[in-house]
Amino acid sequence: MSRSPNGMKNISALERRILNRIQEDLPFTPRPWRDMADELGIEEDSLLKSVAILKKKGIVRRISAVFDPRKIGSVSTLVAARVAPGNIHGAVKKINSYGEVTHNYRRAAEYNIWFTLIADNRKKITRIIDEIKGDKNIDKMTEFPAEKLYKIAVKFKA
């Protein structure tokens, strides 16, 4: 059985092709949107309008650069925290107080807050994790250091 994320039933074949394309490398050219539009066989204006609509619908959250931490001399790790439901706000406030936290998610599982850290070195990652572990709102934490970089993409049938 094929499952569609919410809202995906109402997008066109062209929008699916656009979503597939914008997850690939952005052309490093003076007019990257025009070049992508040319690849898709549409006008640049049409591509930009479609992306704006997909963003407004909440299908596209953001378009941003993704760096391989190791290639820029950094270290990254994924951390799972177990937090009592009444302590979520305080725990997330502590976690988000570190600029090295790139993002976090709440999950419906024993370990209900997951977040990623990127820092200059392993020592700094360890220090931050130890500080966060000391927060009274957090019951337990487990770390999953990055061993291999994966590019996760969602590909749609156009």
Image: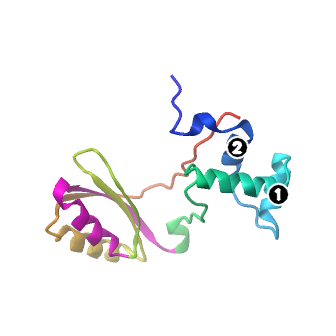
Binning the other alpha carbons within 10 Å of mark 1 as few (below 14), some (14 to 19) or many (20 upward) gives some
Seen in the picture, residue 108 relative to 63 is either above or below; the reply is above
Residue drawn at (58%, 43%) of the image? 154
Q: How many marks?
A: 2
Mark 2 → mark 1, Cα distance in angstroms: 14 Å
Residue type of the residue flagged with mark 2: Glu
> Decide: marks 2, 1 in contact (CB < 8 A)?
no
Residue drawn at (53%, 26%) of the image? 2
Picture quarter with the C terminus: top right
In-front residue for pair 109/123:
109
Q: Which mark is residue 15?
A: 2
Task: Find disc 1 in the rendering and name its residue.
Answer: 44
Check the image and tell me how it is coloured: rainbow
Q: Secondary structure beneath disc 2?
A: helix
Residue type of the residue flagged with mark 1: Glu
Seen in the picture, residue 118 relative to 46 is either above or below; the reply is below
In-front residue for pair 61/99:
61
* Residue 135 place in picture, x, y as percent: 17, 70
Q: Is residue 78 magenta?
A: yes
* Residue 100 place in picture, x, y as percent: 40, 73
Residue drawn at (67%, 33%) of the image? 157
Can see residue 106? yes
* Residue 107 place in picture, x, y as percent: 31, 48
Instruction: Specify whether 99 is left or right of 158.
Output: left
Question: What range of the chain is rendered magenta?
Answer: 73-98
Q: Earlier in the sequence, mark 2 or mark 1?
A: 2
Q: Is residue 71 magenta?
A: no
Residue drawn at (54%, 64%) of the image? 68
* Residue 121 place in picture, x, y as percent: 39, 75
